Image (cartoon, rainbow, N blue to C red):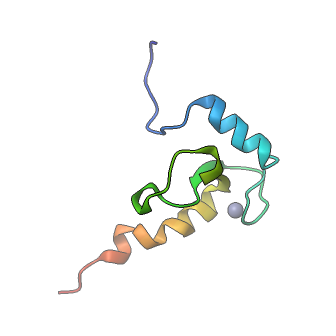
């Protein structure tokens, strides 16, 4: 396969399946643009790449969820 590989680990078919299952809407706010695939249970917390652990989130909800891991919130004040 030629070309750049994306950093995302989901094959296109998996993304399409999850988007389709979730009616191409963010599971959190219902937005239908800027959608991405989210791990319901993060891989770091033992979640799997199984379709049952994947959901559709818009980039805004996804980034809110990731605030917990945002380095800006782990800044040291020393
Ligand atoms: Zn959303």
Question: In the rendered image of this protein, does residue 62 appear above or below residue 3?
Answer: below
From the viewer's perspective, is 53 left or right of 47? right
Quadrant in the picture for residue 28 = bottom right
> Percent from the top left, x then y, of residue 2?
44, 12
Q: Residue at x 78, y 53 (%)?
A: 25
* Outermost residue to the left: 78
Quadrant in the picture for residue 58 = bottom right
Viewer-side residue, 48 vs 59: 48
From the viewer's perspective, is 64 left or right of 24? left
> Percent from the top left, x then y, of residue 68?
44, 73
Q: Residue at x 48, y 38 (%)?
A: 9
Inspect this view and state whether residue 54 appears.
no
> Percent from the top left, x then y, of residue 52?
65, 50
> Percent from the top left, x then y, of residue 20?
78, 41
Quadrant in the picture for residue 15 = top right
Q: Quadrant of ligand 1?
A: bottom right
Q: Residue at x 45, y 17 (%)?
A: 3
* Outermost residue to the right: 23
Q: Residue at x 63, y 64 (%)?
A: 61
Question: In the rendered image of this protein, does residue 49 appear above or below residue 65?
Answer: above
* Outermost residue to the bottom: 78
């Amino acid at each position: 396969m030629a070309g750049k590989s994306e950093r995302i680990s989901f094959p296109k078919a998996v993304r399409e399946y999850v988007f389709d299952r979730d009616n191409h809407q963010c599971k959190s706010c219902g937005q239908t643009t800027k959608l991405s695939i989210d791990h319901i249970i993060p891989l770091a917390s033992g979640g799997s790449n199984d379709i049952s652990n994947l959901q559709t989130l818009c980039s805004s909800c996804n980034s809110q969820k990731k605030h917990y891991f945002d380095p800006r919130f782990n800044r040291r004040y020393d």
